[in-house]
Image: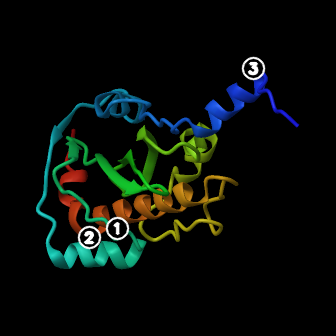
Amino acid sequence: MNWKPTPFAIAGLAMVSAPLMVQAKIYVSAEQAQKILFPNKSFIKAPILITEDLQEKMRSASSIRHPFQGDRIWRAADGSYFIVDEVVGKHEMISYAVGINPQGHVTGIEILEYVESYGYEVGDAQWRKQFIGKNANDPIKLNQDIQNIGGATLSCKHITDGVKRVAVLYELALKTPALAARPK
């Protein structure tokens, strides 16, 4: 028996043997996310030093092992915060931003950059809406007060844990009642 490849067989072999190319999807920049989460506010950069003690408290509350960088924090005059963080999806980093109002409640999250080849559904507005109103006292746990997305479980879990650590960061290091209560 003599096999002669058809054009379809050749195309199929090429597709199977071709390397999978994944490109980063940039949803919005940090500046654009600020305008989305806080349309009428201006922010100034407000980096803080993340001590080992604070890092450990954030780790224990969220289970995120990747260290938090304290240089991507912005503050508005009313005590609102805009914080950029990153967590590992399945293999690659996911950059996202969290808006927190002066009372410590999440006003929203925006996905900035997503590199994974699947699980991108975490960028859907419906899924991200679940975080609105949450604070450090809420569980902010996947399958508890945040619903999972089938096929995106690790991205969902890690972003959820990341939002928890940002809420804990606000509670432990950023909350300033005297400034938040100051007249505008």
The type of residue carrying mark 2 is Leu
Tell me how far mark 3 sits from mark 1, CA to CA.
58 Å
Residue 110 is drawn in which quadrant? top left
The answer to whether residue 86 is left or right of residue 56 is: right
Is residue 76 visible in the rendered image? The answer is yes
Check if mark 3's residue and mark 2's residue have beta carbons within 8 Å: no
Q: Position of residue 129 (x, y in %)?
A: 57, 45
SS at mark 2?
helix
Residue type, label 3: Pro
Front-most of residues 98 and 102:
98
Disc 3 or 2, which lies upstream in sequence?
3
Residue identified by numbered label 1 = 168
Please, is residue 35 above or below residue 76 in the view?
A: above
Residue 73 on image: x %, y %: 22, 48
Question: Amino acid under label 1?
Answer: Val
Say which mark, if any, is on residue 172: 2
Q: Residue at x 55, y 35 (%)?
A: 18
- Rate crowding at label 2 as few (under 14), some (14 to 19) or many (20 or more) other CA atoms within 10 Å: some
Which one is in front in this view, the residue at disc 3 or the one at disc 2? 3
Marks 2 & 1, CB-CB < 8 Å contact: yes
Could you tell me which residue is drawn at 21 percent across and 47 percent down?
72
Q: Please, is residue 122 above or below residue 32 in the view?
A: below
- In the image shown, does 102 or 36 lie closer to the viewer? 36
| 13 displayed left or right of 130 | right
**Disc 3: CA contacts within 10 A as few (<14), some (14-19) or many (>=20):** few
Q: Which residue is mark 3?
A: 7
Residue 181 visible in the displayed image: no
Q: Which residue is outermost to the front?
A: 1
Measured as percent of width and height from the top left, residue 109 is found at 45, 44
> Looking at the picture, how far across and down is residue 173, in whole percent?
21, 66
